[in-house]
Image (spheres, grey):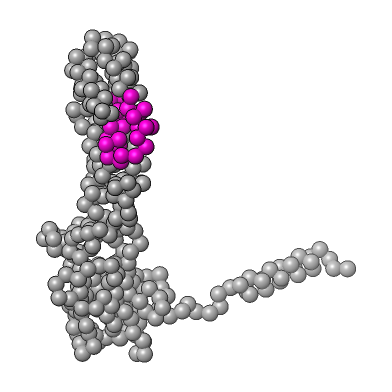
Amino acid sequence: MMSSNARSFAVFLFLVAISLCFSPLVPAIVGQSSSNWVKLVSVYDETTGQRVSNASQLLAGDTYNVTFDVNVPFSDPSAFYVVSIDPSMELYGSQFWYVLSPSYPGFNVSTFDPTHTAIRFSQVQGTLELAAVFTVPNNITYVGNEQGVVIQRPLYGVDVISVLAGTSIVGYYSPVLVSSQILQYQQLYTQDSLLLSSHKVNSLYTPAYQAVMAQAQSLYGQGLVSQAISTLELLNSSNFPPPPSPPSDALLFAGFGAAGALAVVAVVALVLFSRTRSRVSAMESAITSAANQLSSLKATLSSYDQRLAEEVDRLTKKLREAKE
């Protein structure tokens, strides 16, 4: 009968055998590498005439001049690699490609056609410098519409420039593609987030700010970029007048903060109603409710802050007009 030590040793040998069976004993396939052969040198926006500081994002409708190096780590005399521009990119001028290092040994000028989206080079160790000039299609972020409302989203995962060796992608440049509206929304949202994080928004208005920003993010996530921008544009000083100083009591603070929040949320409802033109009955109900709540607060606030009471009255009238 096998002893305890013998059984343990047998189990150990079995585990070792299993691990060897599943260990990668063959070398990696040539061309499959975690390194990126593409190294950006510069990105210029030919539409604005300026160098792009944030090359991780390109703007739809603009023309770009992207200069980059292809760093080939080893030679293979019988192999080629292909440098491509995504087929959705549009030609600007007479050609896509410009070879900036014609002395690179893998470059054959007699077979080079710069008007094609894909060009081929012999796989020779060294550095090939290229420039790609192209236009990002203006409608590339549009994904459809709903009841006449445009739906658009940032486009991720597009290899605007890629390098293929054999069947493996060994180099790429994959910026996020955005429209001018998407960029405007991102800038507004960042600006408002900084105002909150730097405590430049009065604490009375913080809940209202957060509610509006959350609503804007929800719209943006659904692709309703224009509506999301309109929502964030509500966060301005005219909708958030300075609180009275000194306050008479804690009730004033509570009433003032509630009125400010309701005013903003009411205008958000108005914007959604006028822009999306959907779910009409539900939106009318929401507008009526908001208007009624604002009216009830107006009388209370008029004895504390006449300017705020007038602002609430103006918003109430605006809401009621939207229903007519």
Q: Is residue 257 visible?
A: no
Q: Quadrant of residue 14?
A: bottom right
Q: Is residue 212 visible?
A: yes
Question: In which quadrant will I find the N terminus?
Answer: bottom right
Q: Is residue 94 above or below residue 55?
A: below
Q: Is residue 147 above or below residue 134?
A: above
Disc count in the image? 0
The residue under the point 29% across, 13% down is 252
Residue toward you, 265 or 287: 287
The residue under the point 21% across, 90% down is 110
The residue under the point 26% across, 50% down is 182
Asked whether 1 falls inside the magenta stretch, the response is: no
Q: Quadrant of residue 203?
A: top left
Residue toward you, 1 or 269: 269
Secondary structure mostly taken by the magenta-highlighted segment of the chain: helix
- Left or right for 220, reference 309: right
Q: Is residue 154 above or below residue 270?
A: below
Question: In which quadrant will I find the C terminus?
Answer: top left
Q: Could you say where residue 269 lies in the image, as x and y percent from the top left?
A: 31, 32
Q: Could you say where residue 303 lies in the image, as x and y percent from the top left?
A: 23, 9
Asked whether 264 falls inside the magenta stretch, the response is: yes
Q: Could you say where residue 77 lies in the image, as x and y percent from the top left?
A: 34, 90
For this orientation, the residue located farthest to the right is 1
Residue toward you, 272 or 63: 272
The residue under the point 37% across, 37% down is 279
- Left or right for 167, reference 107: right
For this orientation, the residue located farthest to the front is 324
Magenta stretch: give its range.
261-288
For this orientation, the residue located farthest to the left is 49
Q: Quadrant of residue 250?
A: top left
Q: Could you say where residue 60 lies in the image, as x and y percent from the top left?
A: 23, 58
Residue toward you, 67 or 254: 254
